[in-house]
Every structure is written in C-alpha cells, then in structure tokens.
Amino acid sequence: MLPPTRAEDVEGLPAGIALLHHFANTEDRRGFVAHGRRLTGHDALTTPGDLERWLREHDLLMGDAPDTRAHQDHLTRAHELRTTLRAALRQDAEGADQGGDVAVGYSFHVTLAAGHGAHLTVAADPVDTALAHIVMAALTATVNGTWHRLRMCPAPDCQWVFYDNSRPGRARWCSPQLCGNRTKTQAYRRRRSG
C-alpha cells in the first residue's frame, strides 16, 4: 500500500499539519516501483501560476492576482520555504534530526483583541502573507506538540513527508512495508556483495 498522497487521506491529521503536509509534498521525490506502479518524482510548484493555484486551493490567497512583476520572486520564496521546511523534517536512518537550523525571513504583526483572539497580518503582498501562514502553521504545530510527528521518510528514493499517528510516535518510514523493507533489502544486498 502506498503512503497517502493527499493529506485528507491521513487518519487523525490535525488541520495545521495538513497544510504543512500538503506544502512539503509539493516536491515529490518518490522514484521507485510499488505494486507494479512506477512512481516518478515531480514538483507541483514549477511556475508562478502553479503557486498561485496551490495557494488558492488551500484558501491562503483570496481576491485579485498579485502583482505580476513579483511572480518569480514569490515562486523563489515558496521554494526556499519548502526547502527549509523539508530540511527541518529530515531524519537519518537512526531517527536523529538532520535538518539543522535555518531561518526564514518573515515579519509578523499579531493583533490581540478582546473577544476576537489573535489575528496575523503580514506587512507584505498577498503571496508573502499566504506563505507566512504556512510558517505560522509550523509555529502552531510546535506549540501544540504535533510538529514532532511530522517526519520525512529516510529512504533516499522516497523522502515523502508523513504524519506519524502511531501511538508511541516513533515511526521511521512513510510505509514500513514499502520503504522500510526496500531500504533494509538494499542494505542487506550491499553487505552481502561488499
């Protein structure tokens, strides 16, 4: 069985984590055969139009299209954010964090109002504001304790970001039956041939 491609297919996935899951997996690096089906990696955000469409589909961008002069800059910032997010979720074969610390540059303004709670505003154009909401989802996941369950599969030919909803919270592979077995088999073959 393949790991779920859509966040909606993951049982028990918190809302903010779903956004991070979707965004991180717009870069799909899976390149293996599973159950007779060849998976080929692809990038869902190759053009500024792809980014705008993705942000709208996830209710992060409303209204008119942003300034066309900034389209390529938006795409570059989205790729930088995604790369940083994926690096933070990377783990080695022993489960240790391999992400490192990388800063992302967003300026937030949070308004706290009686009866209305907190409201995030970003002194930027609509796309930067949308990307800032992805950053805020990561911060919220950290605060509410769900961040540590969002992981990247350590299989080099997979690197799918998944949510570990197991009770102990120690899953290593997006799919133990696929990536776990495939990686263990490859390591076994290397040991035997070496």
Image (cartoon, rainbow, N blue to C red):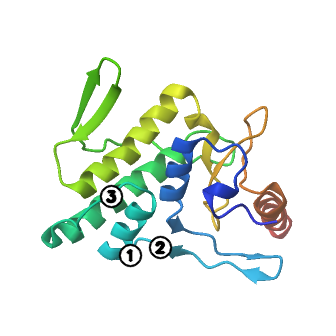
Q: Is residue 169 above or below residue 11?
A: above
- Pick the quarter of the image with the C terminus: bottom right
In front: mark 3 or mark 2? 3
* Left or right placement of residue 67 versus residue 26 in this view: left
Residue at the image position 44 percent from the left and 41 percent from the top? 137
Identified by mark 2, the residue type is Asp
Percent from the top left, x then y, of residue 56?
Answer: 39, 63
Identified by mark 3, the residue type is Leu
Residue at the image position 67 percent from the left and 60 percent from the top? 155
Classify 10 Å Cα crowding around label 3: few (below 14), some (14-19), many (20 and above). Answer: many
First along the sequence among labels 3 and 2: 2
Identified by mark 1, the residue type is Thr
Residues under numbered marks 2 and 1 in contact, where contact means CB atoms less than 8 Å apart = yes
Cα gap from disc 1 to disc 3, whole angstroms: 18 Å
Cα gap from disc 2 to disc 1, whole angstroms: 6 Å
Name the element at disc 2.
strand
Cα gap from disc 3 to disc 2, whole angstroms: 20 Å
Location of mark 2 (residue): 43
Location of mark 1 (residue): 46
Classify 10 Å Cα crowding around label 2: few (below 14), some (14-19), many (20 and above). Answer: few
Name the element at disc 3.
loop
- Pick the quarter of the image with the N terminus: bottom right
Location of mark 3 (residue): 61
In front: mark 1 or mark 3? 3
First along the sequence among labels 1 and 3: 1
Residues under numbered marks 1 and 3 in contact, where contact means CB atoms less than 8 Å apart = no
Residue at the image position 77 percent from the left and 39 percent from the top? 166
Percent from the top left, x then y, of residue 183?
Answer: 76, 61
Q: Nearer the viewer, residue 119 or 39?
A: 119
Q: Nearer the viewer, residue 161 or 57?
A: 57
* Left or right placement of residue 112 versus residue 15 in this view: left
